[in-house]
Amino acid sequence: MTNVCCIVEGAGEVAALPVLLRRIHDWLTPALPFPRILAPIKVARDRFLNRPDEFSRHALLAAAKCGDDGWILLLLDADDDCPARLGADLVARLGAAVPHRRSGVVLANREFEAWFIAAAASLAGCRGFQLGPQPVPPAETPRDAKGWVKERMPRRAYGPTTDQPALAAKIDLRMAHANSRSFRKLTSEWLRHMGADPAAETAA
């Protein structure tokens, strides 16, 4: 069984990313053995990115957890960084830190919640989510994607640790794939490291 060890920056992603990856597996790679998605490693973004010792320590921990046959998925919010430039830098740094492990990097542009915007039409009624009269913006344009989601849950306070996994369990994956380039990056990394045919992405 393949182990997948994720590195994330938010408590919400600790709970939500495994939910999302299991659904992606069921959608794109159902014929493959179900992987063991390990509890993600949570990092403090600034220290992780700016202190080489912190970066190396967490990368080595993920490498030890996933084992020889597993792989590491690093997921961070792009925030105001250029996803292509930061992504390329992180790929190089992760490869240098743990050359003995397969690894992939995904930057949610701009935040994890952008994927909820990409599939907003599928979330109506979930956890009190309401679309409202305004058109849904392009998924990766709002700087504060988390705030956009909060505004559409007026009857409750949006809590990433509880609401992110619930929304991740509900979103239409095909819709998110169609409307978010960074979500397509996530699915392509999944197919690549699971050894699946890349054509599965376009055929699904």
Image (spheres, rainbow, N blue to C red):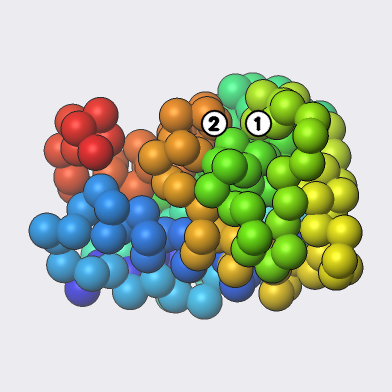
Nearest to the observer: residue 74 or residue 54: 74
Q: Tell me the element at label 1.
A: loop
Q: Viewed as shown, does residue 163 lie left or right of 171?
A: right
Which residue is pictured at 79% across the width and 34% down the height?
A: 133
Amino acid type indicated by mark 2: Ser
**Vertical placement of 186 versus 16: above or below?**
above
Cβ atoms at labels 2 and 1 below 8 Å apart: yes
Mark 2, Cα crowd under 10 Å, few <14 / some 14-19 / many 20+, is many
Q: Which numbered marker is on residue 139?
A: 1
Q: Viewed as shown, does residue 192 lie left or right of 129?
A: left
Disc 2 designates what residue? 180
Residue 15: x and y, percent?
60, 72
Which residue is pictured at 80% across the width and 50% down the height?
A: 152
Q: CA distance from mark 2 to mark 1?
A: 6 Å
**Vertical placement of 193 versus 144: above or below?**
below
Residue 137: x and y, percent?
72, 26
Residue 25: x and y, percent?
30, 58
